[in-house]
Every structure is written in structure tokens, then in C-alpha cells.
Image (cartoon, coloured by chain):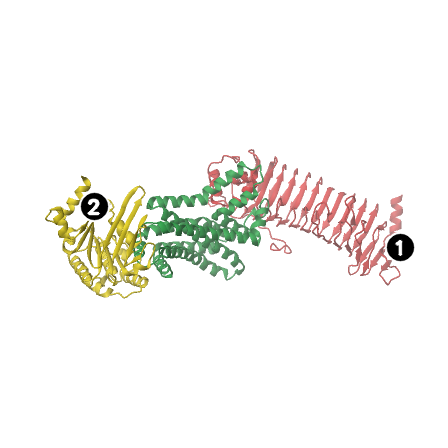
Chain colours: A green, B yellow, C red
Amino acid sequence: MLKILKYSIYDLLRSRWSYVYFFFYLILGFVLFFLNNNLDKAITTIMNIIVILTPLIGTIFGVMYYYNSKEFTELLLAQPIKRSTIFMGQYLGISLSLTLSLVLGLGIPFALYGLFRSAAIFDFSLLLLVGFFLNFIFVALAFNIAITVDNKIKGFGYAILMWLFFAVIYDGIFMITQNIYNEYPIDKFSLAATMINPIDLSRILIMLKLNLSALLGYTGAIFKQFFGSNLGFFISMAVLILWIVLPVLRMRVKLKKKDF
Amino acid sequence: MIQIEKLHKKFGKLTVLDGLDLTIQKGGIFAILGPNGSGKTTLIKCLLGMVVPDKGNIILDGKPILKQWKYRNDLNYLPQIANFPVNLSVKELIAMVKNLRPKASNEQELIDLFGLNPFMKKKLGNLSGGTKQKVNLVLTFMFDSDLIILDEPTTGLDPIALIYLKELIAKEKAKGKTILITTHIMSLVDQMADEIVFLLDGKIYFKGSVSALKTQTEQDSLEHAIAHLISKQYA
Amino acid sequence: MRYLLGLFLLFSFQLQAKTITVCSTCKVKTVAAGVALAADGDTVLVKAGLYKETNIEITKAIKIIGEGFPVLDAEGKKANIFHSENTAGFTISGFKFINVGMSYTKEIAAVFTYRCDDFTISNNKVDMCFYAFMMQRANSSQLINNKIHGKAVKETTSGNGIHLWKCDDMNIIGNVVDGMRDGIYLEHVTCSLITNNISKNNVRYGLHFMFSDNNDYYDNEFMRSGAGVAVMFSKHITMRNNLFHLNWGTASYGLLLKEIYDGFIYDNIFDQNTIGINIDGCNRINYNNNKFIKNGWALKFTGGCYTNIFNTNDFMSNAFDLSYNSHLNDNEFKYNYWSEYTGYDLDRDGIGDVPFRPVKLFSYVVNKTPESLILLSSLFVTIINFSEKVSPVFTPDNLKDATPMMKPVVSIIKPSNKDLTQ
């Protein structure tokens, strides 16, 4: 698998898009850290970008890579390599190279900036950790869609729809449900609904860690109590890991029966 | 020796292989022919493990190969469409395939043969279709394997490369290898094939030598013989 | 006649004012004995040590001075340590009061006065007392530089730091109140001054006005309390140059205003409060030059509020700048800086060319269903806020700042002892 991983990363590192992605983060990082004197705004922007854009790019890259490397995959399939090895290698390759772009793109400006403010390093690591998870989760979901749907256009559509669902539609349904049942105690429901969606979960984790919001007070008490505790943090991490493991498992099951 | 027993495969409602039985002896060139959609590619892909059959068994040299992968080390496959990762150079691609398949190879000889030396450092994305097919051929023939499967090997080749290809196939045959070819170029079949396997409706409709086919169909040329076979489908 | 006699007596005693020293090895061993011995104008000097005394009655204009913070320990008894009625002109300074017991029925304090005038309570420390200072019907007195510390947990079992009822012309200056129910409580108190105090970690309010008109408070710091300051049913209050910060939690406010008329609120900083100012039924108040930084809500209106004016304030990085509960608006917003403003300034006069609408649609949703706060700053919320911004449906059409500033307008220099990071 390491060989496939190596070649996937190698291939991606030579692709223009990896650099576009990398430079996007780099420029964004520099602009936010150095040209913007409002650090809170900068961190909020980075949070939004990580929570919204990372999944989108993971999704698009995942689907695109799968469909575009179809023939290459077939070449590999004719080699004496296990099927799951090929796809796991490709999956890890794309997830890792995306994470690398993110970490370096934001990390370099931060390292230059952070020389003077090293206390924020933990918060920043959390941002990157969440980015890492979101990359892995959404590339896995995108691969699942691509493996299930052979039609490239359809697959692309479904993938975007999937992202749209997690990023926007889910929250819309969530909010409407809350409003319909607001006579009832719905804080536990809200907590659970937040835990289920990896984008929401990531957003809350970052917001609470960075003390960005009014969430700490007001009704946020239960959320703060939960997410602020070590247990809550570990459960959140476990949920995020599960969001990687389950799609990967499905991918493996699906692959066993897949015809190329 | 390849033994295929009662192979079934459906894509959705479409039955592609319908209890196909086939035995191919070791050594020689076998042309797998049939009209479009007769299941040629599916059969080959079953052999390669790329398509998972619904039922049936495939035994290669006495060992069942379904859901296995190591046997592919002794199998060379030329895919129909040569599309490679665009960001790799020819050299890197060859190195990669060699790396994935730790086995003796003679790629330099083939590179010289097809005149690929000037292209070695070029990215695959910038190569013409014919050149890509040549790279494809190098990747297929550079390993020494007992079974060689060629899916439309002549696509995009210039006449000289075609001659080299034929020589290459003949050479491999001389080494006692089993070569499976699917093609629409009947002259190639006429010249080279020892035996023809004709697929129709997911079954073997005819298996035998070129002359036997001609005799059976009472046709002089192979093209007409094949056309005769196919016309039965439309009847 | 009484007045004249008093003046004469005061004069004659002034001449022969004496000092009575109290210590464990002195002739006078208790504070109560010292106070009893003293006549008007005398000084009772209490040396450092532990004095387990309660109900020390002050009936004369004397100075009771502690040296090296002698400890007056009530041992948890339900009794005042110093008690005074109908007396004027005394001073209590330099003591440490501890362990005044909690009572559900009586208001017990380290120092309790009733109908006393012109007294001074300064430089004392109060630790773990039910109430620290309870002044009823006092006039023209000083409470200066005292440090009050408690560990209040519940409103019902704790008392206030400085508690004033029906007082006039009081000066509360430079006190630190920490961990009481209300840091400073004023009920029916008029024409008083509250300045340079620090009130923090109080269960209920840092500073609490009830029915108290014409007061002025400035240069104070209020932090980590249920509400930094609560001003209720009062008129003509001036609030300036205060720092309200980190009042953070379920229903926490920097400043809670209820039924307030004709006040002035200017040059204050509201930093990281759940709600910067909660405005409930308040009319004719001027809000100028205040800075709202990183609050959950900078301003939250509940109940009808009319003809309030908000000019030249800074609203920076608040989750919500403004939350509004009705469709009518009679308040004015002008020349404020809003960090969320995304307009442009083509004529370069420093004022944005398009109006800013400070009320987000999401704030209505949150008002209705507080739990939906968990969706804060999600893409969905951003989208609905944006759509509301483009075509307002829920927000009053005239609720806007037509002249938003392009750059922050407030430059308050923070008092040096008020470290925001603490």
C-alpha cells in the first residue's frame, strides 16, 4: 500500500490543483495574519474556511481524482496488488496531500507570525486537527459516492449535493426542527444533532476552544459543559474517527463486489 | 492452462456471461472474437479479477483465482485504452510498474524497439495516442509471464509499430506462452491466431482453428466466416 | 439649642481629645470597653490581635482605628460587630472583620448603621461575613478603600457587600468587593457617587440600583458577576468610564437596565459579556462613545424602548450587535462603528455610503429558540442573515445606522489597574 500511497501523493504533488490549493491557503494565511489587524476576525475567517471549504475541496478532489484516475486504477488492477490496497493507497494519498496543503499553507504564515505569539499554538493545532479530520472524512465520503455511481457527471452532482447537505441543508432542517419543538426541552436533541454532522461538530469544537462566541454563556451552558469537558472532547474525537472508519469500511465492502 | 466453468455475470438485467465454459490449453495464440456486447471484455476482466462473476469458477494452472490477486504476477495485460496519470513521465511510469511488480523485466529492449527513447522524460499527458499505446505495449511485454492478455493491441499504432507488435507476439508464442487477444482486425487474427474462440450471447459459440471455422461456415475468408457467425444473431 | 450645645461640647472636647489604646496586654483589653470609655472626639487605637467581639455600640463621634489590621471575629454569631444608631461623625478604619453569621431572617453586617450621618468607614477588610456594611437611612457618609471578600454560592444564603437603603449623598470610593451576593446594593439612594470600585465574582450583581435616582458612577470595574451592574426603576443615572467584562454565563449581563429613564451611558467598555447591555423598557437614554468588544450580544432589547440615542459607539466582534424584539423602532443609531460593516466609502469622508443593519435574522430565531444558538456562524445561518440583509422582512425597516463609520471611533484609555486578561 505504501507504494500506491507514494505514487498517488507523487502524482498529486505534481498536479496543478494541489498547488492552487496550497497557495490559496498560503495567501489567505498571510493576508489574515499580517494584513489584518483584527485577530478575532482572522480566526473566525479561518474557522469558516476550514469548516466549509475543507469539506468542499475534499469532496471535489476525492470525486475528481477517482474518476480521472480510472484508467490508471485499471492499470493497477491488472497488477498483482490487492484491490483494497490500491484504493486505500489512493484514498490516503489524496487525503494526506490535501492535509499537507492545508497544514503548510496555513502553517507557514502562522509559524512566521507565531514566533511572537506561541500561546496560540494549541488553538491553531486544533484548527489543523479539525481540518485533517474533515479532509479524511469528506474524501472518504466522496470515494464512496464515486465507487457507487459510475456516471461521472452524476457522481459529481451527488458529491456536491452531499457537501451541500452537511454544510447547509442539515442545519436548515436542524433549525426548523428546533423551532417546531421549542416548547420541549431540546438541548439534548440539539447536542446529539450537532454531534452527528461532522461539519457542525467541527465548528462547535473550534468555537468553544477559541472562545469565539456567546455559546459559552446563555443556553450554551449544556454545550459548554459537554464539549468543554475531557469526556466531551474525546467523544467528539471518537465521532470524527467513526466518520472516517465507517465510510472506509463501506468502501472496502463495496469494492469487493465492484466491477471495473 | 485456463479452465473456466459455468461463468455467469449480469450487469443489472443484462446477462453478459451465461454459463460460459471454456478451456484454453497452455501455449499458443487465442483470438477471442464476437459481436459487440458478446462478453469478450467481461470475460477477460473476469480473468483479471476486475469483474467479479456472479457464479462459476476460473482455474488457472490448477488454482482457483477468484478473489485472489497474487496470480496476476504471472499475467501481463494490455488494457484497451491507454490512459495514464498525466503528471508522470514515461520513465517514472515504467519505474513505478516495475516497482509494483518485483520481477525481471527487459523494458530497455522494448523502448528501443518502439523508438520511445526521446519520449522518456515527457509527461504522459503530452503524448499522442499512438505513443501512449507504445508505452502501454512496453509495460505489457516487459515482464516475462506465462499468460498475456491483449485487449485491442493495435489501436493507434502506425504500420511499422504494428509489424513490431506482430513480431513480438510471435516471439512470445515461440517461448510457449499463452496469449489471448481480442481485436477487430481480422487480418491479425488470420495471420496469427492458432485458435478462435467465438462468443455469442454470453456463451462459446465456436472454438477451433481458423481453417476449421472457414470449413464450418463454408466461407473463404475469415471476415466472411465471422460475419456469417454474427449474422446468426440477427436472424 | 441642642445644636449650640453640641457645637460647644465638640469644641471643648477637641481641646482635650485623648487616645485610648486597646490591646491584649493593655489596660483596656476589648474594643467594646475602649469604645465605651471614649468620649466625642477621642480616638480608640486598636493594636493588632484577635478580638472576639460583637455588638459593639457606637454612640459618639469617635475614631476607631485599627493598627496592623486587628481581627474582629464574630465567630459565626448572628450579630453585628459594630452597631450604631442616630450617631454622626464616627470613623471606623483599619480593621479586619470576619465570620459574621448568616441569617435567613435578619440582615446582619460587620458594620450596621441606622440613621447615622457623616461617618467614614475606610481601609477595612471584610472576610466571610454575611453582609459587610449595612447602612440604613444614612446621609453624607464615606465608604472608602475597603476590601470585601466572600464565598457566596447561592443568592438565598448570601448577603451584599455594601448595602445602602434610603441614603443620600453617599460616597462609595475605591472598594473591592469579591464573591458576595450583590457587590454594592443601593435601594432608594439618591445623589450619591460610586467610583473607582472593583466588584467581581458576585452571585447576582456587581452593582445594583433599585429606585435610586440622580446617582453617578464612573471608573469602576465590574467583572464575572451575574450582571456587572443592574440598574432598575431609577432615573437620571450617569454611568461613565466603567469597565464591564467577563460577565459570562447563563443569563449574564454586563449592564442590566430595567425601567430606566433619562440616563447617560458613555465612555464605557463592555468586553466579553454574554450580553453587553440588556435594555428592558428604558426611554430617553443617551449611549455615547461606548466600546462593545466580543460580547455575545452587544445590545439586547426586551420590552418597549423609546427615543434612546446610540451615537459614536464601537461594536467589535460581537456575535450579535443588536437583538430586537419588536417591529417598531423609535431609537436612533448614528455614527457608530460596526466591525461587521462591509460597505464602502467612495467619497472618503470616513462614513460608509450604505446603511448598516445591525439586527440579524438569526437573532430572532435565537430569541424564539435559544438552543438554535448552536448553529451560530454556520453557513446556513450566514445565508439566512444575508438574505435578510438584502431584503429585510423581519427587522424594522428604519432600524439601521445610516451613517456607519469606516473606522473605530472610540479611544478610551483603560485605567491602568484594569487588566483585561485577568
Nearest the viewer among C329 and C150 is C150
Nearest the viewer among C362 and B89 is B89
Say what amino acid the circle numbered 1 marks. Leu
Q: Which residue is located at x 45 percent, y 48 percent?
A: A52
From this view, report whether residue A250 is shown above or below residue B70: above
From this view, report whether residue B38 is shown above or below residue C331: below
Question: Residue A11, can we see it?
Answer: yes
Do the CB atoms of the residues marked 1 and 2 lie less than 8 Å apart? no
Secondary structure state at the residue bearing disc 1:
helix
Question: Residue C117, can we see it?
Answer: no
In the drawing, does residue A130 fall left or right of residue C196? left
Q: Chain of mark 1?
A: C
Q: Chain of mark 2?
A: B
Q: Nearer the viewer, mark 1 or mark 2?
A: 2
Instruction: Compute the Cα span from label 1 to label 2.
Output: 127 Å
Q: In the figure, residue C94 lies in which quadrant?
A: bottom right
Nearest the viewer among B173 and C11 is B173
Q: Which residue is mark 1?
A: C37
| Quadrant containing the N terminus of chain A in the rendered view | bottom left
Q: Give the total number of marks visible in the rendering.
A: 2
Q: Point out which mark residue B35 bears.
A: 2
In percent of width and height, residue A204 lies at 52, 49
Q: Which residue is located at x 86 percent, y 63 percent?
A: C25
In percent of width and height, residue A76 lies at 31, 57
Nearest the viewer among C338 and B98 is B98
Q: In the figure, residue C26 lies in which quadrant?
A: bottom right
In the drawing, does residue B108 fall left or right of residue C291? left
